Image (spheres, rainbow, N blue to C red):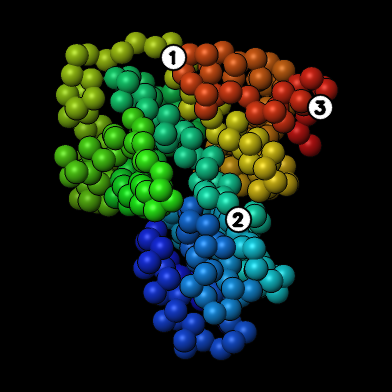
Amino acid sequence: DLVIEAVFENRDVKATVTKETEAVLGESAVFASNTSALPITELAGASVRPQNFIGMHFFSPAEKMPLVEIITGEMTSDQALAMAFDLTQKLGKKPIVVKDAPGFFTTRVIGQTISQGQRMLAEGVNPALIENGAAFNGSPMGPLETLDSISLETAYHGIQQRKADTEAAGQEWESGPESEVIIRMVEEFQRVGQAKGAGFYDYDEKGKKVSTWPGLKDAFAPDGYVDIPYQDVKDRLLFPQVLEAIRIMEEGVLTSVGDGNVGSIMGIGFPPHTGGVYQCVNAYGVQAFAERAKELAAKYGEVFEPPGLLLDMAAEGRTFG
C-alpha cells in the first residue's frame, strides 16, 4: 500500500530507487521519500505517478523520535496525504503537514542553530561555551553534538549536493564558514560523527560521548579562543531558529502555529519549556524580540534581521495564536 524510501540525500540515487520500486508496485500504492531537505516536487519527477508521491521525514533515531513531517508536493493527491497521515498515527507518532520547499520546516529551523554553532567554532569561540549555551537555553543537545548524531558525512553530502545544484543553475557556489568547518572535519581530519566514534566529540565503542575532541582548539582557534558575551552565544543559538520559523510562516510553507510549536519541540529539540518556536516569541514579547533581533543583526549578520511578519506583528501589538 505504501513504501517508504530512506536512501541517503542524493537525487540520482533516490530517482533510481523510485523507478525500480514503482516498477513492482500496484498503481494505487503510495511512494514516500524520507528526506530532510530535498524538494518533494523535484523528487517526484522520477515517478510515473507523482500524485502518489509524498515526503515522510522521520527523525533520528526513528524508533524513538515521536514526530513525522509530512511534505506534500505540487501534485500530491489528498488520498496520498490521508494515507501517509493515517500511517504516521498508526505508528504512534505525531504528524505535521508542511508544503514543499527546500528544507521544509524542521530542517530549515534546526539548520540555523547548527550553522551558528559551526560559525562560532570557525570564529574561534570555545566549543564548550557553544554547547553549554545550548544546554542553558534548554536544548537537550548542543549544535556540535547534534551534528555528530546526524553525521557530518550526511551534512557533507548535503553541501556537495547544494554545490552541484548551484553550479548546474549557472551560479557560483560560495562556501560559508559553517560549510568549511564540515568540509575540514570530513576531508582533513576524517572525523565524520558519532557512528564512527569521532566527530566534534570522541565516543567510546558503544557510541557514548566521552569528551570534545582536543584537536578542535588547534584546528579552529590556534591563537586562543575568542571571547564573546555569553548572552550573545545563547541568543545566537536560539534566535535564528525562531526567526527562520517566522520566515517559513511568512512564505506559507507552514500555516499552523500549533504544528510549528509541536514540531519544533518533538522533532528538533527546541527548548520545551518555551512552548515552541512561536510561543517563545509571545513569552519574550513580540516587540522586545524584534528589538533584540536587530541588535544581533548589527553584530552578527543578516540572518538575525527580523522578518516583515515579525515587525508587522510588533507594530500592531499582535501575538502568535
Could you say where residue 54 lies in the image, as x and y percent from the top left? 58, 67
Q: Is residue 210 above or below residue 163?
A: above
Q: Which mark is residue 100?
A: 2
Between discs 2 and 1, the one toward the N terminus: 2
Q: Are marks 2 and 1 in contact (CB under 8 Å)?
A: no
Viewer-proximal residue, 62 or 285? 285
On the image, numbered disc 3 is attached to which residue? 318
Q: Distance between the Cα atoms at labels 3 and 2?
A: 27 Å
Q: What's the residue at 39%, 58% (across, down)?
A: 9
Between discs 3 and 1, the one toward the N terminus: 1
Between discs 3 and 2, the one toward the N terminus: 2
Q: What's the residue at 31%, 25% (across, down)?
A: 122
Q: Distance between the Cα atoms at labels 3 and 1?
A: 30 Å
Q: Which mark is residue 296?
A: none
In which quadrant of the rendered image does the C terminus lie?
Answer: top right
On the image, numbered disc 1 is attached to which residue? 230
Viewer-proximal residue, 137 or 77? 77
Q: Secondary structure at mark 1?
A: helix
Amino acid identity at mark 2: Asp
